[in-house]
Amino acid sequence: MRHTRFNLLFATVVCIGLWSCKNGKERVSPYAETTPFTIGRIEKIHSNILGQERVLNVYLPEGFSDRDTTRYAVVYLLDGSAGEDFVHVSGIVQYDALPWINRLPPTIVIGIANIDRKHDFTYPTAIADYRSIIPAGGGSEKFMDFIEKELQPWVTTHFKTTATRVLIGQSLGGLLASEILLKRPRLFNKYIIMSPSLWWDDGSLLKVNSDILNPNYNQPTDVYVGVGKEGAGLGRIPHVMQADARSMADKIARSQSPVVKVYFDYLPSETHSTITHTAVFNAFRYLFKPMEQPH
């Protein structure tokens, strides 16, 4: 009787085991046939100016085809690595371009992946305190050359684009975006500057005399400056981030050109770390006119 019970128990266990394996395979097999979910491309561009190969993360709108005739606005995103702001900003672009939202036109996002952002996003300083904070700083001039002479031509060669060129930068990226706005304003016609690190070099960038302030500046340019409740920046002289951002917006607002517009957005519920989503969403609302809703 014991052997009979043991044999019956053994047979039951074997059957259960075989059933589990069989069903386990059935549960797993559908996943072997899945395909990756992609939102664009990873491209590489060799920069002779920087002496580097740079990675570009490229978001492509739904329905994009290299063979179609549609032309696209382009967002250039600083801090555009996959682990930085690329996925988040691309999601907002995708949302705002949905037919039932219709805030943005069809738009490509060019996320510029970082190698050494502290070097690329800062201009030289003679002040020892700042050189100690960012010892390898001072590379922004070459990085601006890269954007103007290599990156933008590459984009217009590889994609069909409209005249709409948007630059997005936050923190040190906001410092670089501010420098481009003041020193090479015609590179972009829409600027989204968030929590700019204008404390760098004792705020010397705020003293730059820019072509964008002159009455004969004739390129329509829209500027969004957003900042949260962020407190003091770094450096030997206390710089309150909110105050510096306001000073930047006020400086642009003093432009005598009728085609330059600036929007200042104080977001007290956001910090330096949390501002990006809210600010980018608001910026698109300010910088892009409402489009005709589909019927």
Image (cartoon, helix red, strand yellow):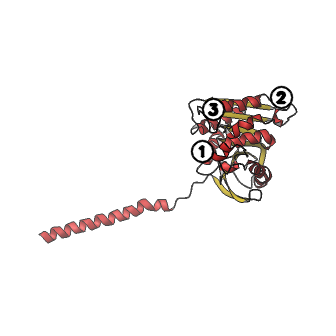
Q: SS at mark 3?
A: loop
According to the picture, the residue beneath numbered tag 1 turns out to be 88
Q: Amino acid at mark 3?
A: Val
Q: Residues within 10 Å of mark 3 (few under 14, many from 20)?
A: some
User: Cα distance, mark 2 to mark 3?
Assistant: 27 Å
Q: SS at mark 1?
A: helix
Q: Amino acid at mark 1?
A: His
According to the picture, the residue beneath numbered tag 3 turns out to be 240
Extreme residue toward the front, this view? 128
Q: Nearer the viewer, mark 3 or mark 1?
A: 3
For residue 237, which quarter of the picture?
top right
Q: Residues within 10 Å of mark 2 (few under 14, many from 20)?
A: some
Q: Nearer the viewer, residue 208 or 14?
A: 208
Q: SS at mark 2?
A: loop
- Mark 1 near mark 2, Cβ–Cβ under 8 Å? no
- Mark 2 near mark 3, Cβ–Cβ under 8 Å? no
**Mark 2 or mark 3: which comes first in sequence?**
3
Q: Is residue 27 left or right of residue 259?
A: left
Residue 230, relative to residue 26: is it above or below?
above
Where is residue 211? Give x, y as percent. Answer: 83, 36
Where is residue 233? Give x, y as percent. Answer: 62, 37
Residue at figure coordinates x 74%, y 50% from the top left: 143
Q: Is residue 225 left or right of residue 24?
A: right
**Mark 3 or mark 1: which comes first in sequence?**
1
Residue 222, relative to residue 143: is it above or below?
above
Q: Nearer the viewer, residue 21 or 256?
A: 256
